[in-house]
Amino acid sequence: MTKTFTRRMALATVGSLALLGAGSALAQTAYPSQPIKFIVPYPAGGATDVLARMVAQKMQDSWQQTVVVENKPGAGGTIGNNQVAKAPADGHTVLFGIVALVQQMTLMKLPYDPIKDFAPISRVAISPSVLAASPTLPINNLAEFTSLVKANPGKHSIGSYGPGTSAHLQGALLNLQSGLDLMHVPYQGGAPLVTAMIGGQLSSAFMDAGSSKQHLPKFKLLGVTGTERLSWLPNVPTLKEQGLNSYEPMGWFGLFMPGATPKPVVDKFSAETQRILKLPDVREKIEAMGLIPGGETTDSFAKVVKSDADIYARIIRDAKITLN
């Protein structure tokens, strides 16, 4: 009787494993089974929107399945983010998000968990930040800038493209690590920030390398974020090279699905995204925007998301940054 029971249990186990394998295979072959919706939590026309539409079109051409892009702006991106977090976890609703997704988790109360409620797929593009100084300042590098600010307390400023943005957090970190008192001056977006820098209204600013690329030659460039120098700014050292810590994170545009989406579906979507991002015409367009093409695996992107979340959370706590 025991042998019969054991035999039945073994057969049942084999049957269960076979069903699981069949389910994974089905997810790989049947998906996508309906139109895919890209949710962009920002207005049409910006870099996020442009990148999303480029990937969506390539995916639609390849899979012969409709891929639509819907802009759901509002509340710093949280409206669109929340829509995807609460969407059916079947792989047909995808978030085209940015690094603010993980920065906000320490700055505000959110209706979703940026880590648990999303399945990272891949970064599409990466955007380093550049620390730029006014061309009128009598300095040529970061060390001289630091000395100038310390010698003139209360007289110098650092701009950002909004409270709680990467530029704001990076400026606060510079104050902390270098013992500076740069006054934070927020603007409503990258364009007004660039205009203020050109007009000499700011001493310095962390500027998005992509959107500001054409204007950067007008300023004194003191450093870049990330772990490597930019190919098109080879003479500008990283901030890490200059002894500053926690400047490894860079801005990114990435794809996410609801957290409970089956792994075979996430992996299939990620593989297609990686294929698209290797296409020469796609890479050329991304680089023309002043960005670095992405395209890593789901596991690699998940590590980036977790690491960035931890680093930004530490900066926000140490600098006592709030949005009030």
Image (spheres, rainbow, N blue to C red):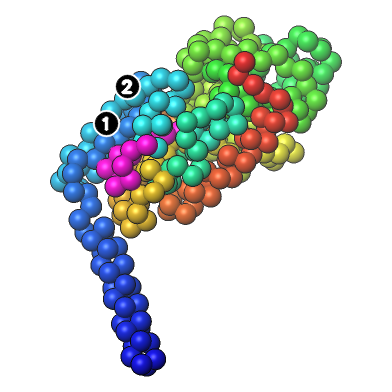
Measuring from the top left, give residue 279's x and y in whole percent: 30, 47
The quadrant in which the C terminus is found is top right
The answer to whether residue 139 is left or right of residue 224 is right
Q: Residues within 10 Å of mark 2 (few under 14, many from 20)?
A: some
Q: Residues within 10 Å of mark 1 (few under 14, many from 20)?
A: some
The answer to whether residue 268 is left or right of residue 106 is left
- For label 2, the SS is loop
Q: Residue at x 76, y 9 (%)?
A: 155
Measuring from the top left, give residue 277's x and y in whole percent: 34, 45
* Region of the chain picked out in magenta, as a range: 86-99
Measuring from the top left, give residue 126's x and y in whole percent: 47, 38
The quadrant in which the N terminus is found is bottom left
- For label 1, the SS is strand
Q: Nearer the viewer, residue 36 or 189?
A: 36
Residue hosting label 1 = 69
Q: Is residue 23 above or below residue 239?
A: below
Q: Residue at x 71, y 25 (%)?
A: 320
Q: Residue at x 28, y 28 (%)?
A: 70
Magenta stretch contains residue 91: yes
The answer to whether residue 71 is left or right of residue 181 is left
- In the current view of this chain or complex, which residue is farthest to the right? 151
Quadrant location of residue 133?
Answer: top right
Identify which amino acid the numbered label 2 is placed on: Ala
Q: Nearer the viewer, residue 305 or 287?
A: 305
- In the current view of this chain or complex, which residue is farthest to the left? 64
Q: Is residue 274 above or below residue 203?
A: below
Measuring from the top left, give residue 187's x and y in whole percent: 54, 12
Tell me if residue 278 can be seen. no
Give me the disc on residue 268: none
Residue hosting label 2 = 44
Identify which amino acid the numbered label 1 is placed on: Val
Q: Residue at x 49, y 44 (%)?
A: 116
